Image (cartoon, rainbow, N blue to C red):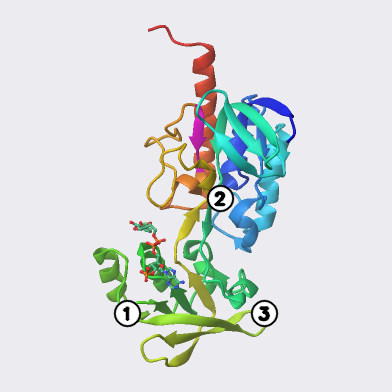
Amino acid sequence: MSQENEHVQCLIIGSGPAGYTAAIYAARADLKPIMYTGMQAGGQLTQTTDVENFPGYPQGIMGPEMMEDFRKQAERFGTDIRFGYVSSVDFSSAPHKIVVDEIKTITADTVIIATGATAKWLGLPSEQQYNGFGVSACAVCDGFFFKGQDVAIVGAGDTAAEEATYLAKLCKTVHLLVRRDEFRASKAMVSRVLATPNIIVHYNTETQEILGNGKNVTAVKVVNNKTNEETDIAVEGFFVAIGHKPNTDIFKGQLDMDETGYLLTKPGSTLTNIEGVFACGDVQDMYYRQAVTAAGSGCMAALDAERYLAAKEHPVEA
Ligand code: NDP
């Protein structure tokens, strides 16, 4: 065990749009932030291809390139960006203790958590092979690329229902693959799906394989789990909407979270239940999950951290 110890004013955990934006604001406010990137530096966007809905990129940009821009901008103002993962935290007393890569302990006056969420995948090899080339876990991000085409989407919760209706506005036909004989989604969402003429719901249907020509998706092989009948449905796009897992395991027992693990923040802010600990981006947002909303909340987290430090330094007399 290393005895190495370091103290910082502001430690940022995670390097997606939320983390980098927090870093830009914190660095410009002279909080001298240190960021630990996590194992997937750049976050979920490094796994996408074109990003066309982030303001400021009129021609669109590739996800990894955009995250490179975010990183450079955070570095420009002096953020100390380090590759490494936070293996445990102790928020029971101030300053907060953060252990990195299981060996290095850092103490921090403020901690900004931007660890994101991970999309759940079916786990098929073909799903990974065509990820970014027809396979996507975000209809709002990638639906546009399948305008006028046929697509399939797997899932039966509110996300799948919402994304299926979103895709139906853009695509010719949307095949919604539901593994049971009923939805999990709310009644209102299901009614909307059933009332949309170009959504075809396939109940009791499981995905066996995503088929392609080596470059792009061409069809999805499904099986009816009641009749065992196999069918190939011709599609150009395949969307996975079976839920996300927030990356919050290391905060269990220390920070308030909902039953699915999303961190709870005070409404309209990034404040967690622990003073000096702030959460931004997908780790505390199961609804919007967009790069631009994550970036916006990253800005909020840095401002909240800055104000917290200022109030500690210059307490207002009661
Ligand atoms: P959920 O966990 O609610 O639903 C996941 C769905 O995916 C379930 O229907 C599940 O099927 C299905 N599924 C899981 N694994 C597989 C698999 N291997 N193959 C096929 N299907 C699978 O996740 P959501 O992302 O839909 O929603 C998360 C939360 O966010 C929910 O609380 C939801 O209400 C909320 N939300 C609310 C919205 C709104 O109000 N506008 C919009 C989006 C989300 P099964 O049912 O058989 O278990």
Identified by mark 3, the residue type is: Lys
At label 1, counting other C-alpha atoms closer than 10 Å, the crowd grade (few under 14, some 14-19, many 20 or more) is few
Is 318 in the magenta?
no
- Label 2: state its secondary structure: loop
Ranked by sequence position, the earlier of labels 1 and 3 is 1
Q: Is residue 66 left or right of residue 55?
A: right
Q: Which residues are magenta?
A: 276-280
Please tell me which residue lies in front, 53 or 176: 176
Instruction: Classify 197 as above or below 21.
Output: below
Q: CA distance from mark 2 to mark 3?
A: 29 Å
Q: Main secondary structure of the magenta part?
A: strand
Q: Which mark is residue 55?
A: 2
Is 278 in the magenta?
yes
Identified by mark 2, the residue type is: Pro
Q: CA distance from mark 1 to mark 2?
A: 32 Å
Which numbered mark, 1 or 3, is in the foreground of this view? 3
- Quadrant in which the C terminus appears: top left
- Label 1: state its secondary structure: loop
Q: Which residue is mark 3?
A: 215
